């Protein structure tokens, strides 16, 4: 595939060897780059039973097949590994400029195995490729460490840096990897794997050219997309609070309506994802009070989380690499906490929700501060918020007392003690040490009677979208190899994407009753299968979730891939490729002892018992039954979730796994 | 002829839409032609923030092949 570099780098931190290898062309042809290349490599090279924090585990930094080609919204980089949080497949991804930096060093991926004796960082440019001492950076937060590492000279180019904060160094199982001032590839505990290897950072400063087959076609597609995005901006009179009202209307309707992908553009451009909060809570999509509450539990919801309040602090907007949307921003927080931090990234919806309505905390300023604490530590705000919600509910029910909380009053909405608890988690001190590994580990410490308050799927805390609201989302939470992730798909996202216009077997989304949606059925199973497969293509290309959300008519991923590779493939053929990637990830889990059918949503997240008021009143999601339809559509055993032999054969996976990268 | 994709709210006439929500129109057609086919008053369309490819649009906007027409901005994800 001409848009890929065709090589990977293997770095053994135990003995310091660095080997460059050529990847067989057929690998890209079958699984693209990104998670696909990562799944191919990790399946082959991590032995069963490998300790995720041991020398046998591998952590890979992978770029996307379209990154650097001129294709828009294709600049995501991915971290792939065996997750210490779930014990199975782990991945996380992030925007910024690190993805092209990988390819500009002449490789599509860098894989690290072994454990260094002392802290190190890895440096690479066009000429140099070496493991260097990182003693002076160890113990420094991710933002400060990145600034220092960017001072390393390499020609005229400022290096791109992926770095862990103190959470990763402290082996917190909910830690991620940061770049660009604390933006995090947050999920699956990928930061702890870097920490276990004593690998503080990866610093890249190459400037090699990235090719593609039909540059003119890629350019034409990008020009068209950029022009459309440029036009989509909310009218000046439109206030952010209108989304809260729309959420109320949607929550009250007895039907679900298919959504239109391009309508996501305008609000994302103006407000970023923070526009979601009030709307999500009002419509039942945003979990409240550790998934046990309803919108009216959040006092002054609309006023507290008005997205326009966040914009008043915004000092600049920013775009990821090759992105016309620019949903990111920086906000001024120099007036908070004695001016400890001058600024922070505009918090994402996930962070606002996890430290706002989920904890019944309506102090937005506290959330800004927590956002920066977590970004610097490199800790996942989704997992951290869910874990604190668990701790509060345990405290409220007498299962944790003040002796264990170091004197903290863990009450709903007690923002000052929530901040203190975040600091304890980051430092791994007192109760923070018990909570720094997420809820599943916390239950091991605080006892099985606390398990009912621990919201996780297969060990990973769920994203801030409610599985009772969207049964297709429930299935993705459960069946995704890296469980609990909200970015794989949902019913709402399915409507946005309009996959039926590129795939012959994907059902068309239509208005449907919410009650009917909650009865397990084959159609949702096929839709979730198509969504999961398409999502793998997005990750293989290095694509952005918001490109995916714009829909196939706006962000033309299939056309981009065909142009970049010189292919003439159909949507059906591409979704088959996505199924291959997804199945490889499932096979990784099975190789490492994960039984897919053993992963369940907590009863509360299924609406068992159902909420008695609010937009989710009397709704129960029968996720286990719906998962069977998903697995059936994927060609897996519907009872066990294990891919059938004939499916694996039909996807050519055995011959793919027989291939080896060659030393050059 | 051009084809446009319409995500129509409940209560609209769907007679001119195929089962995947696409509508065929002559070259040079405007958004007002779609509203008429849906039997949606222009004022209501404006209240519902009718948009083309995510950009709020006026009824006299000329349509292009492949345009996506929708009636309110809802976003999902995070």
Image (spheres, grey):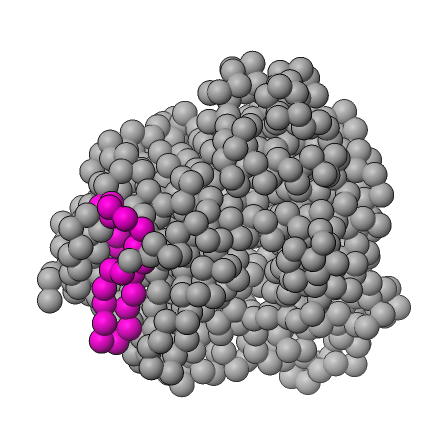
Q: Picture quarter containing residue A24?
A: bottom left
Q: How many marks?
A: 0
Q: Quadrant of the C terminus of chain A?
A: bottom left
Residue at the spot 20% in from the left edge and 57% down from the top edge: A10
Indicate the position of residue A290 as horizontal and vertical percent values. 65, 31
Q: Picture quarter containing residue A260?
A: bottom right
Above or below, A210 against A590 in this view is below
Residue A220 shows up from this direction? yes
Q: Quadrant of the N terminus of chain A?
A: bottom left
* A113 is within the stretch colored magenta: yes
Indicate the position of residue A296 as horizontal and vertical percent values. 82, 35
Indicate the position of residue A292 as horizontal and vertical percent values. 69, 28
Q: Picture quarter containing residue A401?
A: top right
Residue at the spot 61% in from the left edge and 64% down from the top edge: A328
* A250 is within the stretch colored magenta: no
Above or below, A101 against A346 in this view is below
Q: Which residues are magenta?
A: A109-132
């Amino acid at each position: 595939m001409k848009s890929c570099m065709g090589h990977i780098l293997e770095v053994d931190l135990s003995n310091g060897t660095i080997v460059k290898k050529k990847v067989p062309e057929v690998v890209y042809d079958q699984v693209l780059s990104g998670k696909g290349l990562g799944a191919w490599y990790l399946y082959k090279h991590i032995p069963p039973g490998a300790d995720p924090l041991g020398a046998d585990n591998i952590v890979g930094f992978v770029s996307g097949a379209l990154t650097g080609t001129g294709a828009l919204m294709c600049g995501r980089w991915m971290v792939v590994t065996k997750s210490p949080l779930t014990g199975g497949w782990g991945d996380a991804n992030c925007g910024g400029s690190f993805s092209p930096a990988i390819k500009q060093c002449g490789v599509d991926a860098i894989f690290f195995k072994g454990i260094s004796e002392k802290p190190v960082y890895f440096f690479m440019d066009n000429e140099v490729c070496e493991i260097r001492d990182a003693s002076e950076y160890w113990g420094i937060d991710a933002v400060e460490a990145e600034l220092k590492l960017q001072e390393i000279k390499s020609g005229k180019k400022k290096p791109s840096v992926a770095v862990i904060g103190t959470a990763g160094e402290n082996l917190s199982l909910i830690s991620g990897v940061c770049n660009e001032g604390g933006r995090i590839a947050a999920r699956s505990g990928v930061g702890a794997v870097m920490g276990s290897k004593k690998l503080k950072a990866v610093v890249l400063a190459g400037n090699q050219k990235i090719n593609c087959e039909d540059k003119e076609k890629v350019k034409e597609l990008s020009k068209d997309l950029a022009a459309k995005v440029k036009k989509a901006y909310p009218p000046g009179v439109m206030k952010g609070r209108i989304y809260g009202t729309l959420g109320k209307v949607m929550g009250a309707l007895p039907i679900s309506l298919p959504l239109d992908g391009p309508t996501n553009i305008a609000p994302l451009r103006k407000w970023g994802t923070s526009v979601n909060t009030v709307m999500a809570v009002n419509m039942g999509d945003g979990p409240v009070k550790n998934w046990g509450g309803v919108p009216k539990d959040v006092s002054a919801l609309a006023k507290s989380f008005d997205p326009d309040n966040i914009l008043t602090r915004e000092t600049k907007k920013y775009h990821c690499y090759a992105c016309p949307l620019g949903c990111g921003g920086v906000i001024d927080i120099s007036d908070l906490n004695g001016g400890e931090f001058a600024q922070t990234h505009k918090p994402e919806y996930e962070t606002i929700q996890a430290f706002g309505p989920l904890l019944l905390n309506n102090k937005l300023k506290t959330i800004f501060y927590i956002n920066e604490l977590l970004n610097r530590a490199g800790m996942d705000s989704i997992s951290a918020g869910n874990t604190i919600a668990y701790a509060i509910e345990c405290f409220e029910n007498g299962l944790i007392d003040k002796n264990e909380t170091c004197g903290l009053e863990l009450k709903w909405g007690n923002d000052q003690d929530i901040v203190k608890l975040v600091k304890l988690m980051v430092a791994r001190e007192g109760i923070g040490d018990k909570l720094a590994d997420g809820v599943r580990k916390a239950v091991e410490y605080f006892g099985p009677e606390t398990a009912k308050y621990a919201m996780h799927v297969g060990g990973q805390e769920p994203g801030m979208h409610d599985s009772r609201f969207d049964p297709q989302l429930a299935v993705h939470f459960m069946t995704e190899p890296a469980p609990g992730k909200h970015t794989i798909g949902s019913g709402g996202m399915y409507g946005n994407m309009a996959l039926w216009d590129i795939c012959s077997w994907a059902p068309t989304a239509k208005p449907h009753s919410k009650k009917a949606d909650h009865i397990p059925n084959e159609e949702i199973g096929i839709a979730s299968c198509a969504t999961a497969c398409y999502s793998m293509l997005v990750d293989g290309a290095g694509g952005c979730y918001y490109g995916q959300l714009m829909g196939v008519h706006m962000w033309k991923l299939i056309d981009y891939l065909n142009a970049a590779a010189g292919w003439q493939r159909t949507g059906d053929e591409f979704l088959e490729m996505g199924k291959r990637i997804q199945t490889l990830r499932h096979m990784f889990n099975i190789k490492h002892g994960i039984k897919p059918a053993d992963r369940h949503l907590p009863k509360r997240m299924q609406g068992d018992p159902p909420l008695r008021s609010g937009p989710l009143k009397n709704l129960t999601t029968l996720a286990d039954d719906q998962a069977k339809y998903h697995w059936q559509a994927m060609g897996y055993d519907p009872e066990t979730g294990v891919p059938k032999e004939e499916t694996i054969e039909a996807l050519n996976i055995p011959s793919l796994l027989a291939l080896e990268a060659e030393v050059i | 002829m051009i084809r446009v994709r319409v995500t129509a709210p409940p209560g609209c006439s769907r007679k001119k839409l195929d089962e995947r929500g696409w509508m065929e129109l002559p070259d040079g057609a405007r958004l007002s032609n779609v509203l008429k086919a849906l039997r949606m008053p222009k004022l209501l369309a404006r209240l519902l923030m009718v948009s083309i490819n995510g950009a709020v649009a006026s009824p006299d906007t000329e349509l292009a092949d492949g345009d996506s027409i929708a009636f309110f901005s809802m976003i999902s994800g995070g």
